Amino acid sequence: MVSEGNDDIKIVLSKPSSFDGDADADYKAPNFARRFLSLFRNVRPGSDLANFQAIQLPPQFNIPKSQLQFVGESAYLFGKDLLYQCNNAGSPLERFISVVAWSISTTRAPAFGVAPYNPVLGETHHVSRGSLNVLLEQVSYHPPVAALHATDDKENIEFIWCQHPVPKFHGTRVEAEVLGKRQLKLLNHGETYMMNSPKLIVKFLPPRIDWIGDVNICCQETGLEAELCYITSSIFGSRGLHSVKGKIYQSSSMKTLYEVEGHWNSTVKLKDINNGKETIIYDAKEVFSELKTPVVENLQRVWPTESAAVWSEVSNSILSKNWSKARDEKSSVEDNQRKLAKERNSKGETWVPKLFTVSYSKEDDWECSPIQERVPPAPIVVPI
């Protein structure tokens, strides 16, 4: 944990969560499975939990970071730089395979029984790793929508995410459909890759977290497309746990070029349909080796809306296991958000994001476009 501050602002940055859901190394959460289950006793199956205000997690169930930080980590925390591979592969097909591997690398899950804080409206997170600059903003609270913009000036790469989780309760599990578009632009090659996210599933019996559902990745410029299916195990076994399988094909002819199969928390292999040759395209141990905690490089440039500042007192209290203070500090953050919303309503004002323009349809199809062309270097950096 890194804690720095002055009279105006305090920052608490905790160590990164690993790809397999292990909790932050600074904070080992006790087993809260029974109390976690008790939160849902009065929730009807099929209920949309995104707007279910009766469920407010006490701080004992939180890891010391915001969901905005958790999303950001999937973009800027890595050991092996797969983005470099995406940009520097020699052919369109090789670049597409690298993009598939990068997409899999963003698949991470929190530990069972704990969750990040729900970001407040207008909360931001700004971090740099080398030449990669990443900026997020919580652009909606009801429903919760986060926007991410990242640019790498050295590699001439840009990616934009819009993330809108819609969790629903199904008796023995919660499934969160992650709506919103993701796009990765390799500007040197004039290629844009569009993709979606799988669903996050939380099973109570037996207790586990996994990803399920279909992911489509396509590049209109090259005509290449991938279909991936994330699969979890049944209640009777663990063979399929964390599985991913699919194919890469040419969209014009629908000809399959490669088959994809493996586990997103270990290795994923690519099989060439023509000759049967198999190649490992993704190794989680390499990507997530030696993850380093971000540090504050320039405290004076940190915005008051920064996640690590908004939740600093709550995080400090959780890390010290001062649950009474953690509860009070968390209530203070949440009460302040309600107060600001009430003031806006009384004045007839509509809150407008500072960093993104946002549009959405009746089908909950949210789109978030960054206002700035490039993301500036951040005051918080990941050591290399």
Image: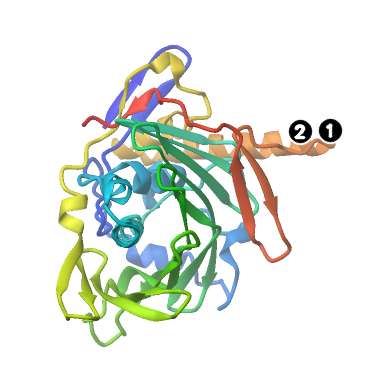
Q: Could you tell me which residue is drawn at 39 percent across and 22 percent down? A: 379
Q: Left or right of 221: which side holds 366?
A: right
Q: Left or right of 172: which side holds 238?
A: left
| Residue 311, visible in the rendered structure | no
- Residue bearing mark 2: 343
Dot 2 alpha-carbon crowd within 10 angstroms: few under 14, some 14 to 19, many 20 or more: few
Q: Could you tell me which residue is drawn at 26 percent across and 88 percent down? A: 236
- Residue bearing mark 1: 347
- The quarter in which the C terminus is drawn is top left
Q: Say which element carries label 2.
A: helix
Residue 168 image offset from top left, x and y in percent = 54, 70
CA separation in Å, label 1 and label 2 = 6 Å
| Residue 297, visible in the rendered structure | yes
Identify the image's colour scheme: rainbow, by chain, secondary structure or one colour: rainbow
Q: Left or right of 46: which side holds 196?
A: left
Name the amino acid, label 2. Glu
Q: Could you tell me which residue is drawn at 60 percent across and 43 percent down? A: 369
Residue 337 image offset from top left, x and y in percent = 63, 37
Dot 1 alpha-carbon crowd within 10 angstroms: few under 14, some 14 to 19, many 20 or more: few
Q: Say which element carries label 1.
A: helix
Q: Nearer the viewer, residue 34 or 350?
A: 350
Residue 362 image offset from top left, x and y in percent = 73, 63
Q: Could you tell me which residue is drawn at 40 percent across and 63 percent down? A: 36
Marker count (numbered): 2
| Residue 302 found in image quarter | top left
Residue 315 image offset from top left, x and y in percent = 37, 36
Q: Is residue 37 above or below residue 130?
A: below
Dots 1, 2 in contact, CB < 8 A: yes
Name the amino acid, label 1. Lys
| Residue 129 found in image quarter | top left
